[in-house]
Image (cartoon, rainbow, N blue to C red):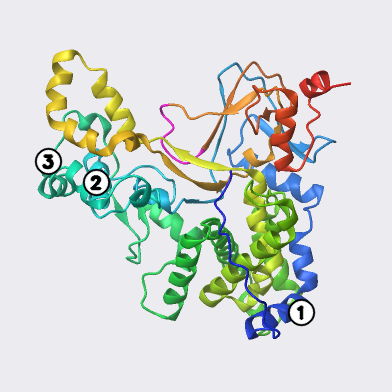
Amino acid sequence: MRHEYLRLKTLEKPSFVSVEKLESILMEREYSDQIAALLAPPSPQSIQEYYKSLNESGKCDGICVRDNGKHGKAVFASRDFKEEELILKDRMLVGAQHTSNKVDCLVCSYCFRFIGSIEAQIGRRLYLQSLGICGDKACDKEHQTKEKMECDLPSKEMIESLLDGDLVLPFTDRFALPEVVSCPAGCEEEKYCSQSCADADWEAYHSLVCTSSNNKQSLALLKFIEHANETNDIFIVAAKAIAFTILRYRKLKKSQVKDKGKGLLGKMDNANFSLLLEAWKPISMGFKQRWWECISLPDDVDPSEELQFRTEIRDLASTSLELLKDAIFDIECAPLFSLDVYGSIIGMFELNNLDLVVASPIEDYVIYIDELPDKEKEEALLTIQTFVDALGDDYSVPCQGTAFFPIQSCMNHSCSPNAKAFKRDQDIDGHAIIIALRPISTGEEITLSYIDEDVPYDERQAMLADYGFTCACPRCLEERPS
């Protein structure tokens, strides 16, 4: 997906190197071999073992991942699929809700299911709107003044009654949502749909990036998050990928024989690095390229300014990484904090174009009311019309974010795909759902379209250029000008 990028002002470069920059350069040199090993493409054997383990765990039943002889990893059917049959429900490896979207949607921080109640979702959004806060950062400037917004909103008492649960809207019992569960450590940033999701998030990422404590680490994390919110929230996903790897490393090390001990401070012995490579394996499977090299040049940047633009993007990532290092640096996992590794993780998200989308239950609720028999609809609207009018066209805003899905990310593009990413009514969390567009036979490669395939050949190729390849699927070969 496209992300918004901060256009940095051009500043005169100082003639000296900062302490942080010098430390980063020295670390890159000291761990150059380990960094290269982390960024090396996984071996065919490693790929086979990893996806075999996913298959055996039941996470990709009916499909397999192997080299297709053309583009590297690909997904193949290991049984027949009927048209519109579910092929895959892929749980994300790491993901995050867009910062601006958190204003519109209160969701579980682990599975991204909507939580609370229809009343709480509507009340929360209207309350934030009354404060002049909305998902669109420019809403105050481009749409309407705060005074006008307040005039169009329900009264403060009505909004509070929604939030407190004192006002129950008609028919919302048919759209029950899970109760809100707080972070195990009590931070205000993360909420969950269940204790199991809270525990799973804590174990996978959150225990390392929780801001609940009023200590140096939490203050550093808040600075990192503030920078990401102001520039590009893809940094938060990258931080979760690093936290995920560190926590896996610690778990693996803890399971080792205790008398092996830790590596020397500031060094990483071969035994410890082999554990880090194992912890890194799930992330290693994604195709990577450094962010500042693979990002498409925005339309508003002149080609003559490309080098400057890519330098600014690299500097932006470097600043983010330094803030992250202040918060969670682990000497035993030092190679993870290389700028090349950090940039490659971000580039992995950029190249895989992975959207996290969960439909809003408010949309389902409003549609349900609209389709009621006239008398029931009229009675319901007497209660909810004020709230629906205040929400406006934004009532249907879904949960949106960025995620990495281990199986879906292996699916190659075709301009005549046999499958699609498609959420059904029952798909109410952040899993990636892949549905067959037509019958698929055993042994056939499963493909998706990365773009709108219903456009002419030249337009398709132009859109696919952002992904770094020229499509040579059967349809393109047939339509290609001679």
Where disc 1 sits, the SS reads helix
| Above/below status of 265 relative to 447 | below
For the residues labelled 1 and 2, say whether their Cβ atoms are less than 8 Å apart. Answer: no
Mark 1, residue position:
30
Three-letter amino acid code at disc 3? Answer: Leu
For label 1, count other residues whose C-alpha is less than 10 Å away and answer few (under 14), some (14-19) or many (20+): some
Which residue is drawn at the image coordinates 27% and 28% (left, top)?
366
Image-quadrant location for residue 25: bottom right
Q: Which residue is mark 2?
A: 126
Q: Which residue is mark 3?
A: 167
The image shows residue 246, relative to residue 305, as above or below, that is below
On the image, the x and y values in percent for residue 194 come to 34, 49
Q: CA distance from mark 3 to mark 1?
A: 62 Å
Quadrant of the drawing holding the N terminus: top right
Q: Nearer the viewer, mark 3 or mark 1?
A: 3
- Crowding at dot 3, Cα within 10 Å, few <14 / some 14-19 / many 20+, comes out as some
Can you give x and y, in whole percent of width and height, for residue 185 in the image? Answer: 35, 67
Provide the major secondary structure of the magenta segment. Answer: loop
Give residue 17's position: percent from left, percent from top: 69, 84
Q: Earlier in the sequence, mark 3 or mark 1?
A: 1
* Mark toward the start of the polypeptide (1 vs 2): 1
The answer to which quarter of the image holds residue 85 is: top right
Q: Give the left or right position of residue 273, taking residue 105 as reference.
A: right
**Is 427 part of what is drawn in magenta?**
yes
- State the CA–CA distance, disc 2 to disc 3: 14 Å
Q: What is the magenta range?
A: 425-431
